[in-house]
Image: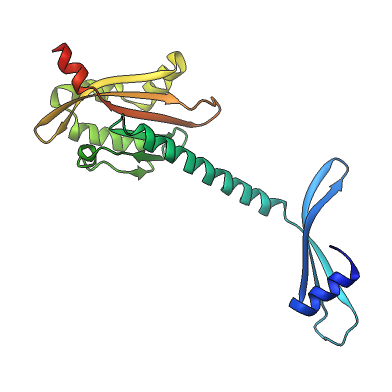
Amino acid sequence: AFTKEKVLSELARTGTFTLNYRLMSGDKVNYVAMKATRMANTNDKHIVIGLSNINAQLQREQDYEQARRESVTFSSIAQALAADYLSIYYVDIETDHFIEYSSDKDYKTLGIEKEGEDFFTLSRKNIARVVHPEDRDKILSAFTKDNLIREMAKSGTFTLNYRLMFGDKVNYVAMKATRMADQNDKHIVIGVKNINAQMQRRL
């Protein structure tokens, strides 16, 4: 690509010539962008060629693309799992940011936030509002960030069974929280499953 003829041809056509490639400095790789332009005076016989380091720019693009792929993948998985769950939460346990996926029309009527920055605080407010009065104190006592992380560290999962109120209708549900497969991942997945039929058989 970098021949005198091609550079001059591209300069005549577009005014600039650009080329991205990698420079080696020992074992270290640096991504660079070359840009060639003519001098401001078009009659000048000189051109200026500059090299800029684009390592940081490429890293940002790669990080964005990876995040986008992971988001699409998780969204697809969550939507598939949501057929068996009332709701699924994807929670960053370092920042408490969360995203909620729900395919159940009744669960959506509870008015629970779909995304936010303070998962455990918002959850405790919602527990006081939508959990059966006889279960609220037990769930509020058990469902804390410290308890959840401690139990997952010990057994790998955190589970709670309780009753949700949909108006006057009572639904038995099971909550299960698990870490992502990669133990270095700072996210956890929390699913809320309808176990009404199972509980009715026991009653």
Q: Residue at x 13, y 13 (%)?
A: 203
Residue toward you, 189 or 10: 10
As drawn, is 34 to the left or to the right of 109?
right
Residue 177 visible in this rendered orientation of the protein: yes
Quadrant in the picture for the N terminus:
bottom right
Residue 120 visible in this rendered orientation of the protein: no
Where does the image place residue 103, in percent across and percent down from the top left? Answer: 29, 39
As drawn, is 10 to the left or to the right of 111?
right
Where does the image place residue 177, in percent across and percent down from the top left? Answer: 38, 25
Q: Residue at x 90, y 70 (%)?
A: 4
Q: Residue at x 25, y 23 (%)?
A: 139
Q: Residue at x 14, y 26 (%)?
A: 133
**Compared with residue 133, is residue 38 higher up or lower down, i.e. above or below?**
below
Where does the image place residue 54, in percent across and percent down from the top left? Answer: 72, 55
Locate residue 189: give its quadrant. Answer: top left
Locate residue 53: give its quadrant. Answer: bottom right
Residue toward you, 48 or 142: 48
Where does the image place residue 14, in percent across and percent down from the top left? Answer: 74, 76
Q: Residue furthest left?
A: 168
